[in-house]
Amino acid sequence: MRQYPPHICRMSLRKITVLIGLALVALCPRALGQGAGLLDVEVEWDTSVMVGDTIRYSISVTNTSGQVLSDIFITNTFPVSFAFVRSTPDPVRSDNGLVVLQVGQLGINGTSSLSLDLRPTVTGTFTNRIQPGSGIAGQITGNPIDAVTTVTPAITLSDIAVSVATSETNVFVNDWIPITITFSNLGPSAISTFTFTDPISTNTLLRGYSPSNQIIISTNTLIFTSGSLAAGQSANIELTLQPTVAGTNFAYGAVLNLPSNIDTNTANNAAVIPFTVLEPVLGEIVVTDVGTQEFNRQNALVEQMVQVINVGSNSVPSARLVLTNIAFKVVNAVGTNDGNPFVVHGAPLQAGESVNLLLEYFIPSRTTNDPGFTAYSAGDFDTSASTNGSFIVVANTNIFNLPNRRILIQFPAERGATYQINYSTNMTFEGAMRARPSVVAQANWVQWIDGGPPKTLSHPTNEPMRFYRALKLP
């Protein structure tokens, strides 16, 4: 129940006029009324509340008749828009708009205290008529007390903050960009629901979204309806966008427009991520050799070695290999371009330098399918390892040299969790790098094979030692 100043305004229904009673209600957040008769009934209640607040009626009954009284009842009659919450004692009758409380027997000058809690559901000015009476006709009389309360709209003190994040740094025309929009309720109150409307900009395709049961698409506009958010809780939207033209001014922005009685701070209601969308330069990097597809019994994947070479006159910071005409999953792909998966070698290639890329396919039928390949420079590609979080250092007893000159590691994991694999030439992991892509644990242990590029920047046999650790991602 909302707290008000502790002072009390007292009034006697036997002595004051209606005009005086109205003046008292206007000046005092709580009021107290008295009823005349063989019983002295006093009621204290809240005269001004908001929708959803609880109004407490504190009722005191004193026997002033000079004799023992029994079968005393206090009848409360109020609008059906008031919800019964609780009472002391429990009611002997409770219907819509009616609650009857029984006092029982009262000795001479005896006093009994009762309470009734009601909750208004609409705005307006309402009256709870409190009438003392008896189950024995004519034994107890008393004037009713009209407890008048003004109900105003509820004020929801919520601050909904918006943030936008993506894992992509280099974006090319027709790349599928994963976008996460987060709505955080900074409190202090909960919010029952809100609607986020987001027009999809021109030259952009919406390739995916979730949660699908809370999002509809209407006339190229995304409409998200949230569930309830308690203070401190967040809700996420996952989008996949595809820019269809190159440019330096491409940006994704999320703006939340809420009424002022829902969101008290509009300064954090918008967030923007700018992108430079590049057009790939073809002809600098070409595919020079495509190996046969072979089944690996260790990881149940079909593998294929593809060699790319920089035929240009300048070095390139990285190399992207896009696979087309492919009907199966490329396990070590790090992204998608116009529906086609691609891998990235994140190290520079000097003019004339080549690199072998081991591709991993998941083909349940184990039948071969010859994909097409397109290669080009992918710009700067960040492969540095994160230094924050809880790491699982892979012990030497869980690192195995395989006959094909690759390294297998294994570590305990939480099923369904995502892990980033870090590797380094030193035990302190100074200057550590991260393997791409991250892995999702399918069981309580993860086995992962280091076969060199594109998952790591170099083959493990090219270094004197290689250490590994796993970082659980949020």
Image (tube, grey):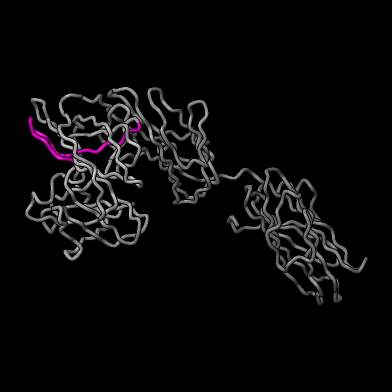
Residue sitting nearer the eye, 109 or 185: 185
On-image quarter of the N terminus: bottom right
Q: Is there any visible trace of residue 21 in the rendered image? A: no
Q: Answer above or below: position of 245 versus 230.
A: above
Q: Position of residue 76 (x, y in %)?
A: 78, 58
- Looking at the rendering, the stretch of residues picked out in magenta corresponds to 339-357
Residue 462 shown left or right of residue 79 in the figure: left
Quadrant of residue 93 within the rendered picture: bottom right
Quadrant of residue 400 within the rendered picture: bottom left
Q: Position of residue 4 (x, y in %)?
A: 59, 55
Residue 63 shown left or right of residue 152 in the figure: right
Q: Position of residue 410 (x, y in %)?
A: 24, 60
Q: Is there any visible trace of residue 197 in the rendered image? A: yes
Residue sitting nearer the eye, 176 or 226: 176
User: In the rendered structure, does residue 354 fall within the stretch colored magenta?
Assistant: yes
Residue drawn 72% across the image and 48% down it: 81
Residue located farthest toward the front when viewing the structure as drawn? 367
Q: Answer above or below: position of 155 versus 145.
A: above
Residue drawn 80% across the image and 49% down it: 17
Q: Position of residue 353 (x, y in %)?
A: 8, 34
Q: Answer above or below: position of 272 versus 405.
A: above
Residue sitting nearer the eye, 396 or 325: 325
Residue located farthest toward the right when viewing the structure as drawn? 138
Residue 136 shown left or right of residue 281 in the figure: right
Residue sitting nearer the eye, 298 or 88: 298
User: In the rendered structure, does residue 114 fall within the stretch colored magenta?
Assistant: no
Residue drawn 20% across the image and 24% down it: 281
Q: Answer above or below: position of 9 versus 88.
A: above
How many discs mark residues in the rendered view?
0
